[in-house]
Amino acid sequence: MDIHFRYGKDDIQLKVPDDSLSYAPQYEPTGMEGCDMLLDSIANPTGCLPLGRLLQEKRKGHVAIVVSDITRPIPYRSFLPHLLEAVGKEGIRREEIVILVATGMHRPSTHDEKIYMFGKDIVDNYTIVDHEAENESTLSLVEGTSWSGAEIKLNRYYVEAGFRIITGLVEPHFMAGFSGGRKAICPGLASLKTVQMFHGYRFLSHPNAANTLLADNPCHLENTSIARLCPADFSINIVLDQERNINRIMAGEQTVSLEKTISYVKEKSCRKVESLADVAITSCGGYPLDDTFYQCVKGFVNCLPAIKQGAEIIAFGSCTEGTGSAEYTSIMKKYAFRHDDFINDIRDGRFFIKDQWQLQMHIRVLEKTGQQNLHFFTAGIPSDVLALLSVNGHPTTRAHLVDALQNQIDEAVASGKRIAVFPEGPYCSPV
């Protein structure tokens, strides 16, 4: 049978056996536009009063609206204007609103990316600020300590706001169980030091720091505790279907509305593993998630519950922006072929550097597949760099990508291996 996968902004088609195990989301069309879902959700929220009523009782200060960065495919243009209009109807002027991009540890958004995400009218008429995790002048100390006992510093535009609205995509997440809600605050608006425990060796070595798991998950416990110490006044949770269209918007109090949304996502996007596969074929999510190799690692990790020990993963991502941050690239090159040294160094506290957590999660995959069986195809990274990224790298061109992948798949099929496919990559998680 033919299966469509995402690669960058394209769909590619690959042929797999008819009996392949398929891990794909099962969202049904709603027939509603995103703007209508938004208006309905803010008027009928879960666990709190409607947004308009809450805004009438806001504290002194600006309204902070927290949005995701370019790595999340949320179609803000379809509903953010309506949210801003609803806020404005409560007598709040444009100058009193700050749109705060929760970059976490990612780079700032470019001007063109802001226009792509929000539309030119919003970019021209509203204050938009990118969070800077390593800029102390933009951070505020929050009273209290996190679940782990860590000091908390968050973006001052968020901390000092008279009213806080958070938005975010809810999907399976390979560390925190599920994204959304509290993740907009930590790591979205947190300092690097605050994230040091959240993404540190001890947390990520815990078996429950994994896709779909919340119980006894230290990442979930940590950022939930931080979100409660500096809570949002209103939370808007977005669910996207397999076509990247808005399928649900569930709004309300930050904890109960997220729990309700996670329950829905779990039903539609988390398939139980009935039989383990010998080979997993996975997209890394397509644009914008697969723009860097750093983000593509999520696609590798996502496959783990569905494959046998020693299985193969055949993964692919566009990597149009290359490997990732300078810090991540340096770690990958420094510890290529020395994974034990890397784990020993971070476990013993010899250093902590931004983005080290992605290599720690990557090593989880290597422990199950081995480097030779972790195939990665891309047209975005040159062969000399790809050779240092702890994968069995297959540099190719866009024109030859499909043929190269199909040849790899055909070879696996000819040897009688059972195949599992992940057309949406990490957006559908096996449990």
Image (cartoon, helix red, strand yellow):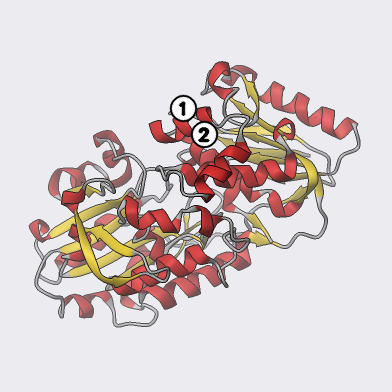
Q: Would you say residue 336 is visible in this rendering?
A: yes
> Could you tell me if the residues under marks 1 and 2 are in contact, i.e. CB atoms within 8 Å?
yes
Tell me residue 219's x, y (percent): 49, 62
What residue does disc 1 label? 322
| Rendering coords of residue 62 (x, y %) | 12, 64
- In the rendered structure, the answer to whether residue 187 lies left or right of residue 320 reads left
Residue 263 lies in quadrant = bottom right
On-image quarter of the N terminus: top right
Residue appearing at x 29%, y 82% in the figure? 49
- Give whichever of 96, 415 is nearer the camera: 415
Q: How many marks?
A: 2
How crowded pointer 2 is (Cα within 10 Å; few <14, some 14-19, many 20+) is rated as many
Q: Nearer the viewer, residue 256 or 344?
A: 344
Amino acid type assigned to the residue bearing label 2 in the image: Phe
Label placed on residue 89: none
Label 1: few (<14), some (14–19) or many (≥20) C-alpha neighbours in 10 Å: many
The quarter of the displayed image where residue 321 is located = top left
238 sits to left or right of 91: right
* Image point (64%, 18%), residue name: 400
Residue 94: quarter of image: bottom left
Say above or below: 160 vs 24.
below
Query: In the figure, 16 relative to 388: above or below?
Result: below
Left or right: 326 as drawn, with respect to 262: left
Location of residue 326 in the rendering, given as x and y in whole percent from the top left corner: 39, 31
Q: Which residue is mark 2?
A: 293
Q: Residue at x 17, y 64 (%)?
A: 63
From the viewer's perspective, tell me whether residue 94 is left or right of residue 15: left
Element class at badge 2: helix
**Label 1, label 2: how many angstroms apart (C-alpha)?**
6 Å
Residue 424 shows in the view: no
Amino acid type, mark 1: Gly
SS of the residue at dot 1?
Answer: loop
